[in-house]
C-alpha cells in the first residue's frame, strides 16, 4: 500500500472533497551506493556547519533564504505550512479544458487522489463521473513543498489522478534548436508515413516495452554474486553515421519493421525522389531575357 504524501481536499466551486494523495508510479531502477574501492567501506556524505566547523544532526538543520552574504532569513516548516493561501489546504479547480489543448511537455508526475472517509465518497464520485462524461480535464492550483503549483485532474479507471504541471514560463523556447531549412519531397514524406503505418500499435501492452537496461544490470549482479562470468549480451546493431539515400533507408526500415512483426516483408518499391533538371546558366539567362523582351510594350512616339 503506497503511503500518503499529502492530505487535503479538492475544491470544486462550493463542493469540497476530502482526499489523500498517493504516488501513482513506482521506480524499479537498480540503485547503487558509493564505496571505498580498497576495502568496500561505505562512503557517506556528512553535513557540517561552516561557522562551528562540526557535523550537525538532522534536528539542527532548517531552511533559510540568503538575502545577502551576511544575512539569512530563516523559514520554518510551520510558516510554509500556514501560508495564507487557499491552495495550501486544498487543490482548487480553476477551469476545465480539453486534454488535447494541454501541451504534454507541461505534464509531470502523477498522483492518485483517494477519497478520505465516507463523507467524501459521494462528491468524489460526482467529480469523477462529471470529468469522464465531459471528456475534459480539470486545471487546478495547489501548494506543496514550499511552492504553488499548477495541476491537471483526470480520471483513470474511476480514480481521479492529479498530474503536476509546469507554469508557462518554466517551458524553454525551442526555436534556437530548429535545424537549418531543408526541402522534402512528397515521396519522402509518404515513405515516412508508410514506415509509421508498419510501426503503429493499438496500445503499449507488449513484451517489447520493458526495461532491458535494468534486466541486464540484474543479470550482472546475480552473476557476480554467484562468482561466475556475467552473461554476454548481444552487441547493438551499428547504424551508419550519416544517411546517404533517405528513400532507401525508409524502404529498408519498413521491411525490417514488417519482418519483426511477423508480417509479409515484401515492400513495393517506393517512388524515387524527383529532381528537376538543371539548365545551363547561359541558356537559362538567354531564355529569361527573351521572355522579358517579348513582354515589353512598345514605347509611344
Image: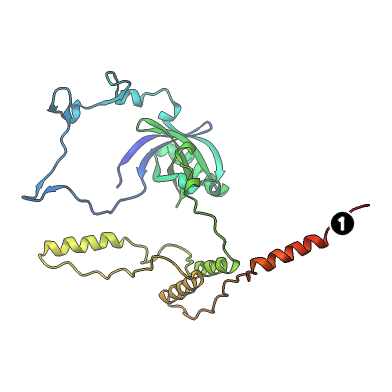
Would you identify the image quadrant in which residue 235 lies? bottom left
Number of residues whose C-alpha sits closer than 10 Å to that of mark 1, classed few (under 14), some (14–19) or many (20 or more): few
| Residue in the picture at 47% in, 68% down | 199
The percent position of residue 231, horizontal first and vertical second, equals 19, 69
Which residue is situated farthest in the top direction here? Answer: 71
In the foreground, 130 or 168: 168
Q: Name the residue that disc number 1 marks.
A: 297
| Residue in the picture at 54% in, 78% down | 269
| Residue in the picture at 22% in, 60% down | 217
The percent position of residue 282, horizontal first and vertical second, equals 67, 66
Q: How is the image coloured?
A: rainbow
Would you identify the image quadrant in which residue 287 lies? bottom right
In the foreground, 92 or 1: 92
For the residue labelled by badge 1, is the local secondary structure a helix, a strand or a loop? Answer: loop
Q: Is residue 184 left or right of residue 112?
A: right
The percent position of residue 270, horizontal first and vertical second, equals 55, 75
Q: Is residue 240 left or right of residue 224?
A: right
The percent position of residue 155, horizontal first and vertical second, equals 47, 48
Would you identify the image quadrant in which residue 232 lies? bottom left
Query: How many marks do you count on the picture?
Result: 1
Q: Is residue 156 above or below residue 19?
A: below
Which residue is situated farthest in the right direction here? Answer: 301
| Residue in the picture at 24% in, 69% down | 233
Q: Is residue 114 above or below residue 232?
A: above
Q: Is residue 77 left or right of residue 155?
A: left
Which residue is situated farthest in the front direction here? Answer: 301
In the foreground, 54 or 286: 286
Amino acid at each position: 500500500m503506497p503511503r500518503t504524501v499529502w492530505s487535503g481536499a479538492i475544491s470544486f466551486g462550493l463542493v469540497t472533497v476530502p482526499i489523500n494523495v498517493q504516488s501513482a508510479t513506482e521506480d524499479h531502477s537498480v540503485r547503487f551506493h558509493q564505496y571505498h574501492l580498497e576495502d568496500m567501506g561505505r562512503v557517506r556524505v556528512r553535513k557540517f556547519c561552516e561557522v562551528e566547523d562540526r557535523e550537525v544532526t538532522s534536528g539542527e538543520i532548517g531552511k533559510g533564504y540568503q538575502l545577502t552574504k551576511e544575512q539569512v532569513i530563516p523559514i520554518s516548516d510551520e510558516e510554509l505550512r500556514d501560508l495564507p493561501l487557499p491552495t495550501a489546504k486544498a487543490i482548487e479547480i480553476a477551469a476545465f479544458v480539453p486534454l488535447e489543448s494541454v501541451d504534454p511537455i507541461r505534464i509531470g508526475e502523477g498522483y492518485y487522489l483517494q477519497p478520505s472517509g465516507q463523507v467524501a465518497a459521494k462528491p468524489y464520485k460526482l467529480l469523477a463521473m462529471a470529468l469522464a462524461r465531459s471528456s475534459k480535464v480539470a486545471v487546478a492550483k495547489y501548494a506543496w513543498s514550499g511552492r504553488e503549483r499548477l495541476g491537471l485532474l483526470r480520471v483513470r479507471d474511476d480514480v481521479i489522478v492529479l498530474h503536476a504541471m509546469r507554469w508557462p514560463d518554466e517551458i524553454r523556447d525551442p526555436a534556437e534548436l530548429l535545424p537549418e531549412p531543408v526541402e522534402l519531397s512528397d515521396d519522402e514524406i509518404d515513405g515516412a508515413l508508410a514506415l509509421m503505418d508498419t510501426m503503429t500499435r493499438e496500445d503499449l501492452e507488449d513484451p517489447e516495452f520493458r526495461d532491458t537496461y535494468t534486466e541486464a544490470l540484474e543479470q550482472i549482479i546475480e552473476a557476480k554474486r554467484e562468482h561466475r562470468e556475467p552473461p554476454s549480451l548481444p552487441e547493438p546493431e551499428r547504424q551508419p553515421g550519416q544517411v546517404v539515400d533517405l528513400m532507401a533507408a525508409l524502404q529498408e526500415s519498413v521491411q525490417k519493421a514488417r519482418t519483426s512483426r511477423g508480417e509479409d516483408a515484401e515492400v513495393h518499391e517506393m517512388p524515387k525522389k524527383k529532381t528537376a533538371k538543371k539548365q545551363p546558366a547561359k541558356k537559362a539567362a538567354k531564355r529569361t531575357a527573351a521572355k522579358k523582351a517579348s513582354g515589353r510594350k512598345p514605347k509611344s512616339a
